Image: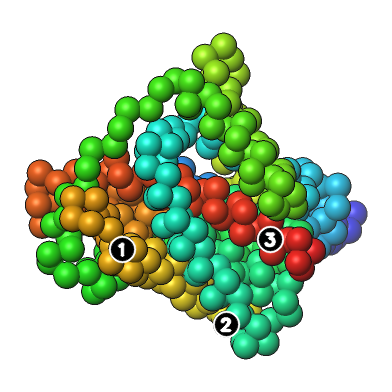
Amino acid sequence: MGTILASQITESLRQFWYFTGFYNCEWPNLVMILIGIAFITIAIKKGWEPLLLVPIGFGMIIGNIPMFPGLNIGIYENGSVLNTLYQGVRQGWYPPLIFLGIGAMTDFSALISQPRLILIGAAAQMGIFGAYLLATLFGFAPNEAGAIGIIGGADGPTAIFLSSKLAPDLMGAIAVSAYSYMALVPVIQRPIMLALTSKKERLIRMPKPRPVSQKEKTIFPIIGFLTTAFIVPSGLPLLGMLFFGNLLKESGVTRRLAETARGPLIDVVTTLIGLTVGASTQADKFLTGQSVKIFALGLISFVIATACGVLFVKIFNLFLREGHKINPLIGNAGVSAVPDSARVSELVGREFDPDNHLLMHAMGPNVAGVIGSAVAAGILLGFLG
C-alpha cells in the first residue's frame, strides 16, 4: 500500500513538473523576458514614455512565461482572457478610442492661427511612404510594407490600427517598433535636426501666433473632419474619433464627456493596448528575421520623416520674406509623437537661444502630424486593404 501511495505521489509531482514554466522554458523566452525588463527599466529610470513602455514591458513578461500547451490561458488561445482582451488590438477597437482621448486633450490653436504649419505635418509623412517603398525592396508584400511604413508617423495607435487591417501577423513587431521609437524621440531627432540646420537657422525667431477665438476652435473639428473624411473615407474610424473628441473639448457643453475621454477612458485603453501588445510578442512569433527587418525599416522611416520635416521648412523659407520665416527646428514636430517631438523643438532651440521659445509654434505641425498620420493610414488602407 505504501509503495502504491509513494508511486502516485511521485507521478503527481512529475506531472506537476511538466506543467511548470521551468520545465517548458527555452532560451528565447528568457530573451524576451529580459527585453521586457529592459523596457520597464528604461521607462522608470529615463522617464521615456512610461505610460506605454511599462505596460508593454510587463506584457512581454506575461506573454513569454513558458507554459504547457492547451491550458487555454495564452494570448493566442481562443477563448482565454488574454485572447479576449487582445481582440481590441486584433480587431482595431482600441486605436479609435485612444484617438477619441487624444482629440479631447488636444488644442489645435497653434495650427488654426498658423495654417501654413499643416504643410510641415504633411511633409513629415514622406517617411511613411519612403519606408513603404523600402519595405517592398526588402521583400515584404505591399500590404505588409504599408503597415510597416506607418511606423514613420510615430503614432502607435495608428500603427496598430493599420497593421490589424493589412498585416495582423506582423502586428506585434510593428507595434513594439512604433512605441519604441516614440519613446526614443529625443535621442533620434536631435542629431538629425542639428545635422540639417545651420546656427543662423536655429536662431530664427518666429512671429507670435495670433489669438484664436473659441468660435474658431469649435468650428475647426467639424470642418477638419469633413475635409479629411471626404478625401480619405477609409480613415473614418481614426479621424472621426479624433475630431469628435476635440469637439467634446471645445464645445464647452460636454465637459464631463471630454474629461472622461481624455482621462479614465484613454488611461484604461492605453493600459490594455500596451499590455496585450506586449503579451503578443511571444518568442516563437517575435524573435524572427522579419522582426529585425521591421525594426530597421521603422528606424529608417522615422529618420526620413524627421529629415523631411526639417528640409521642407528650409525650402519653404526660400519663398518667405524676412520676419515671416519659420525656424526649421520645428520641422521635426511634423511627426505625430505629441507632444514629445514639439518639446524636442523647444529644448534644441533654447540650447542656442535661451529666450527663443518654439513650443507654441512646434505644436502646430505636431497636431498636424496626428491628422497627417491618420490620413496616410486611410490612403494606405484604401489602396492596399
Q: Secondary structure at mark 1?
A: loop
Residue on which disc 2 sits: 134
- Residue neighbourhood size for the residue with mark 3, other residues' Cα within 10 Å, grouped as few (<14), some (14–19), many (≥20): some
- Residue neighbourhood size for the residue with mark 2, other residues' Cα within 10 Å, grouped as few (<14), some (14–19), many (≥20): some
Q: CA distance from mark 3 to mark 1?
A: 29 Å
Contact (CB < 8 A) between labels 2 and 3?
no
Q: Secondary structure at mark 3?
A: helix
Residue on which disc 1 sits: 319
| The C terminus, quarter of image | bottom right
Q: Which of the pair 8/125 is nearer the observer?
A: 125
- The amino acid type, in three-letter code, at marker 3 is Ile
Q: CA distance from mark 2 to mark 3?
A: 18 Å
The quadrant in which residue 325 appears is bottom left
Q: Tell me residue 236's x, y (percent).
A: 72, 45
Residue on which disc 3 sits: 379
Q: Tell me residue 337's x, y (percent).
A: 44, 51
